[in-house]
């Protein structure tokens, strides 16, 4: 159904002369990670998106050091609008919103990153295992499990897991998981199926490629094929997914914390800042909610843009067709 | 429309006349001129082949005639007459109403030429309604079955089937039945109607087109890159290269005595032509980049007979059509600027 | 057709089974002794013992599961720890608000998202299209509860008295107030999905408009309006129908947060409230209810897709051989 979606999006070009430049481009284009890095720095959309990511990362790492005030220190000046002293105003306890925002940024960004990293690793392994044993029992088992996870609306599953188990914490052997790590795991769980599906379909597409067949005829071991031949070639679509997932994970964290089920006081995240600020909306205290709102929207927007941009150029279908073409060209010359 | 003149007689107004057609596609800042001043006419009862490599602009000519090039394309012509009427002066909606009535189109991809969501019957009904506004649904269906019968398909009970339930060959015949449903049809444009069909089905479809021409005196433009189809079907052939017509010849002349060096190379690259057991000719080079316009002959870089200093600087033009001349070619070598380098397919 | 329904339903059975296993697992993994919680604070040891018997906590987990599952199939999701009322009854009481909110949002999403996508595709690359694309991308990117907060800021502080921004009036009490109270929450819930649907409709429409059958309809002289609104739209909407199933799932999940923002006594609020009182049967009951609803909606959407797509409808019929 979506076979020609890309053609439709890019609009009809004069059909006949279109072939030649595409092939040339295919030849010039390196594949895999090198391609991705080149792509990430080539368009202004991806450069700005990367810039925003860097800013948030830096704020997350160094933010609390930059904080002009102690985020927990209460003051007499309550519910002050933004000023030179309090860049983002103060809350009902007279705390500096900017300092709290920096503290919240750290948690929001780290939870998002950690959740996506876990989901990506687990999902990729599961998806590759499924794709590699395609048609056999493991494939069905893994992918049906993924279907079930997807059957839970994510904004129900995460709060339930965190709300149910997070309050008292869960002890797994020597590790004791408190609310925030538990929420991170729950968010990761929600995103695992997405990575698994992408990894599986990429593996299936890649296994059709002739170089895999060639590797097999050389007697390469399965594990070797999987990690040395297949994995490097499916990273691009996975990274595209990770870009989308990061935006999603940050929103889920914010939603769960907003409901009061995730991050708990005295910690803060963009979600808890919004929850704290909502009681004062009718008093016109816009500064309490404006900055976390903006941060959330900006994060999701830039990552949607980044993901779109990457996908346009790294779409597995487009990629594999281009690569096939270029190989044909190579053998001809 | 009496029988006083023969069907291909030049004195009768042609069913389709095109003068100086230009089509440009725009992609961002880049302009690609795909059709560059094409003129030809087709008389009733005549099948004219439009041949060339892919990228030569032959399909775009048909799309331009139908006003079906996308919004980033633009076509203009000095004259565009269908059934004696200059359609350039018509409002778009008016010209739209002529499509499917006076002129019709058959695409190269029958499987995708039908709306997948509707039954064949409903697709017939809505076209037939335009031709016979007063008909009831039953009458329309009966008429559709009759039209299908004319193309060799038993339509009874099949009107409720969906396009995907038919084979490619059946769909192409249904498409022809649908395109020729109008009794006032004069011009049929066929864009590689048989490329997606296998050989036996191809013969049936070609046979069908020829029969329609014979029975209804249609003027047919047949776009193809298959010279075997040309030899079998066409009365006259237009050879296109890089958006221009480089040779216009009756089909016999074209195959016996091709004029333009490009045509000669094209003929040498058909399997089994000429049947001399020699190696098949492979054309060197590629279709030129249409976003730039060269000063001389577009074929010069690939031409084995090019005259340096002439072919790459001055563009040869197609001589005007006269009463006597049968074949004409846009080539300095042919038009006698210098004696022709060789007399046919002798060299290789 | 009926074959398609049966097939899809059978396919959902393992999913539903696992949902029930996970739900039960969570119910038992939740902290605290269920018997103590069920009996209520300060209950006598006898009462706790009675609750333990009733929940069959002394049996093996497998036996407990089957007893619980049998009850669930009968429509018994257990009783609330706090109020002692049946969970199904609590869900029933909260359902109308959530259903109304979701339907309202769905109407907005389809009623605005689809026309936006279609018109955007028809004006491809012109300023209108660029505007729609930018707006829908922003719409997708702003989470619904953030939109809700901004709406409250606007209607609760800036232009007060125009629209109510808190609470819910049941339909049978006052239909007009009911609708008025739902406008802002439904808008907040709808905007992100609206952007999604608009984008999907646009790309789907563009794909269809590039198809050969559109050219051939035009070549047959079919009026441009008919070509676009009948030939193209019907085919373009097929993938949109499938996404509506997913969107409905988002709406049910999204309503959890949006109901909390706008103080609407729906399922989402019930879920959040149940955490505060550690009322686990209610939490799990609501979660299971939403998950099952999601599965059922997806079956309905798949069947609907079969109805509008003759290829699927007829192929399953032929599959009967």
Image (cartoon, rainbow, N blue to C red):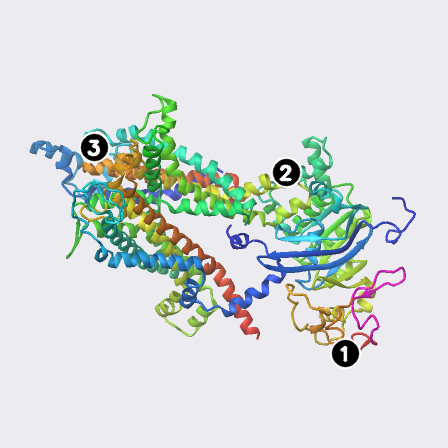
What mark, if any, has residue B347 been given in the picture? 1
- The residue pinned by badge 3 equals C80
Residue A186 to residue A19: above or below: above
Q: Are labels 2 and 1 on one chain?
A: yes
Looking at this rendering, what residue extends furthest in the right direction?
Answer: B4
Residue C79 to residue A5: above or below: above
Q: Which residues are magenta?
A: B317-338
Residue A192 locus on image (x, y percent): 33, 53
Q: Are labels 2 and 3 on one chain?
A: no
Q: Which chain is home to disc 2?
A: B
Left or right? Give the position of C204 relative to A279.
right
- In percent of the image, x 81 and y 46: which residue is there? B84
Residue A266 to residue A314: above or below: above
Q: Are labels 3 and 1 on one chain?
A: no
Figure quadrant of residue C314: top right
| Magenta-drawn stretch, dominant element (helix, strand or loop) | loop
- Label 3: which secondary element: loop
Is residue B132 a member of the stretch shown in magenta? Answer: no
Marks 2, 1: nearer the viewer: 1
- For label 3, the crowd category at 10 Å Cα-Cα, with few meaning under 14, some 14 to 19 and many 20 or more, is many
Q: Which chain is home to disc 1?
A: B
- The residue pinned by badge 2 equals B122
């Amino acid at each position: 159904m979506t076979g020609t979606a890309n053609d439709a999006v890019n609009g009809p070009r004069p059909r006949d002369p279109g072939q030649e430049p595409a092939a040339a481009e295919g030849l010039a284009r390196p594949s895999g990670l090198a391609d991705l890095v080149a792509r990430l720095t080539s368009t202004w959309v991806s450069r700005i998106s990367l810039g925003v990511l860097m800013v948030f990362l830096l704020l997350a790492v160094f933010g609390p050091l930059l904080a002009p005030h102690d985020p927990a220190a209460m003051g007499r000046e309550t519910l002050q609008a933004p000023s030179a002293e309090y860049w983002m105003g103060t809350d009902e306890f007279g705390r500096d919103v900017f300092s709290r925002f920096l503290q919240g940024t750290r948690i929001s960004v780290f939870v998002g990153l950690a959740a996506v990293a876990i989901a990506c690793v687990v999902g990729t392994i599961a998806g590759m295992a499924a794709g590699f044993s395609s048609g056999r029992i493991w494939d069905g088992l893994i992918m049906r499990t993924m279907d079930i996870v997807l059957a839970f609306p994510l904004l129900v599953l995460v709060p339930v897991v965190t709300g149910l188990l997070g309050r008292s914490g869960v002890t797994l052997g020597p590790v004791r998981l408190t609310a925030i790590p538990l929420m991170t795991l729950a968010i990761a769980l929600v995103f695992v199926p997405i990575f698994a599906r992408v990894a599986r379909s990429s593996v299936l597409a890649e296994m059709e490629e002739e170089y895999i067949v060639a590797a097999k005829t050389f007697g390469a071991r399965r594990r070797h094929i999987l990690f040395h031949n297949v994995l490097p070639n499916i990273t691009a679509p996975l990274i595209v997914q990770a870009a989308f997932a990061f935006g999603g994970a940050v929103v889920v964290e914010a939603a769960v914390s907003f409901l009061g089920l995730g991050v708990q006081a005295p910690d803060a995240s963009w979600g808890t800042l919004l929850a704290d600020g909502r009681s004062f909306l009718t008093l016109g205290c816009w500064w309490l909610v404006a900055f976390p709102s903006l941060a959330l929207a900006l994060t999701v927007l830039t990552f949607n843009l980044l993901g779109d941009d990457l996908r346009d150029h790294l779409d597995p279908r487009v990629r594999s067709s281009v690569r096939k073409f270029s190989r044909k060209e190579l053998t001809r010359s | 429309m009496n029988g006083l003149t023969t069907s291909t007689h030049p004195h009768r107004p042609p069913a389709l006349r095109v003068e100086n057609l230009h089509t440009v596609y725009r992609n961002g800042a880049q302009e690609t001129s795909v059709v560059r001043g094409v003129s030809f006419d087709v008389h009733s009862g005549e099948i004219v082949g439009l041949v060339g490599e892919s990228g030569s602009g032959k399909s775009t000519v048909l799309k331009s005639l139908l006003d079906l090039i996308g919004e980033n394309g633009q076509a203009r012509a000095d004259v565009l007459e269908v059934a004696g009427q200059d359609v350039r002066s018509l409002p778009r909606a008016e010209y739209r109403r002529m499509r499917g009535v006076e002129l019709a189109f058959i695409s190269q991809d029958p499987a995708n030429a039908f709306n997948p969501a509707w039954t064949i019957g409903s697709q017939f009904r809505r076209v037939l309604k335009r031709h016979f506004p007063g008909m009831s649904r039953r009458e329309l269906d009966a008429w559709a079955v009759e039209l299908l019968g004319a193309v060799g398909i038993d339509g009874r009970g099949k009107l409720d089937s969906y396009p995907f339930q038919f084979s490619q060959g059946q769909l192409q015949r249904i498409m022809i039945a649908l395109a020729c449903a109008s009794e006032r049809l004069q011009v049929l444009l066929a864009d590689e109607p048989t490329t997606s069909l296998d050989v036996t089905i191809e013969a049936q479809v070609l046979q069908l087109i020829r029969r329609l021409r014979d029975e209804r005196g249609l003027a047919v433009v047949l776009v193809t890159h298959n010279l075997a189809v040309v030899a079998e079907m066409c009365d006259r052939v237009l050879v296109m290269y890089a958006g221009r017509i480089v040779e216009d010849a009756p089909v016999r002349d074209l195959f016996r005595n091709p004029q333009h060096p490009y045509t000669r190379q094209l003929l040498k690259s058909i399997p089994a032509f000429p049947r001399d057991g020699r190696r098949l000719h492979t054309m060197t080079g590629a279709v030129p980049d249409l976003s730039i316009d060269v000063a001389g002959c577009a074929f010069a870089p690939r031409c084995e007979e090019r005259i340096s200093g002439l072919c790459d600087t001055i563009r040869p033009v197609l001589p005007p059509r006269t009463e006597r001349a049968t074949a004409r070619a846009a080539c300095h070598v042919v038009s006698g600027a210098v004696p022709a380098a060789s007399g046919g397919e002798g060299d290789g | 057709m009926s074959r398609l329904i049966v097939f899809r339903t059978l396919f959902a059975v393992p999913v539903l089974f696992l949902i029930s296993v996970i739900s039960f697992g969570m119910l038992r993994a939740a902290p605290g002794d269920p018997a103590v919680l069920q009996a209520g604070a300060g209950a006598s040891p006898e009462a706790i013992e009675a609750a333990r018997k009733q929940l069959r906590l002394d049996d093996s987990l497998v036996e407990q599961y089957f007893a619980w599952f049998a009850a669930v199939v009968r429509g018994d999701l257990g009783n609330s720890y706090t109020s002692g009322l049946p969970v199904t009854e609590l869900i029933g009481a909260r359902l109308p608000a959530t259903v109304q909110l979701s339907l309202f949002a769905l109407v907005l999403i389809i009623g605005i998202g689809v026309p936006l996508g279609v018109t955007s595709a028809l004006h491809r690359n012109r300023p209108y299209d660029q505007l729609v694309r930018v707006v829908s991308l922003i719409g997708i990117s702003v989470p619904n509860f953030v939109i809700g907060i901004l709406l409250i800021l606007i209607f609760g502080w800036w232009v007060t008295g125009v629209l109510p921004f808190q609470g819910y009036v049941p339909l049978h009490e006052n239909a007009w107030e009911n609708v008025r109270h739902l406008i802002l929450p439904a808008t907040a819930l709808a905007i992100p999905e609206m952007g999604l649907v608009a984008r999907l409709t646009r790309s789907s429409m563009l794909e269809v408009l590039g198809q050969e059958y559109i050219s051939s309809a035009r070549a047959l002289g079919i009026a441009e309006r008919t070509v676009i609104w009948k030939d193209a739209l019907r085919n373009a909407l097929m993938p949109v129908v499938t996404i509506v199933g997913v969107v409905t799932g988002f709406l049910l999940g999204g309503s959890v947060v949006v109901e909390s923002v706008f103080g609407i006594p729906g399922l989402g609020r019930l879920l959040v409230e149940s955490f505060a009182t550690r009322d686990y049967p209610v939490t799990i009951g609501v979660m299971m209810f939403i998950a099952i609803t999601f599965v059922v909606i997806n079956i309905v959407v798949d069947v609907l897709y079969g109805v509008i797509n003759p290829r699927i409808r007829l192929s399953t019929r032929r599959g009967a051989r």
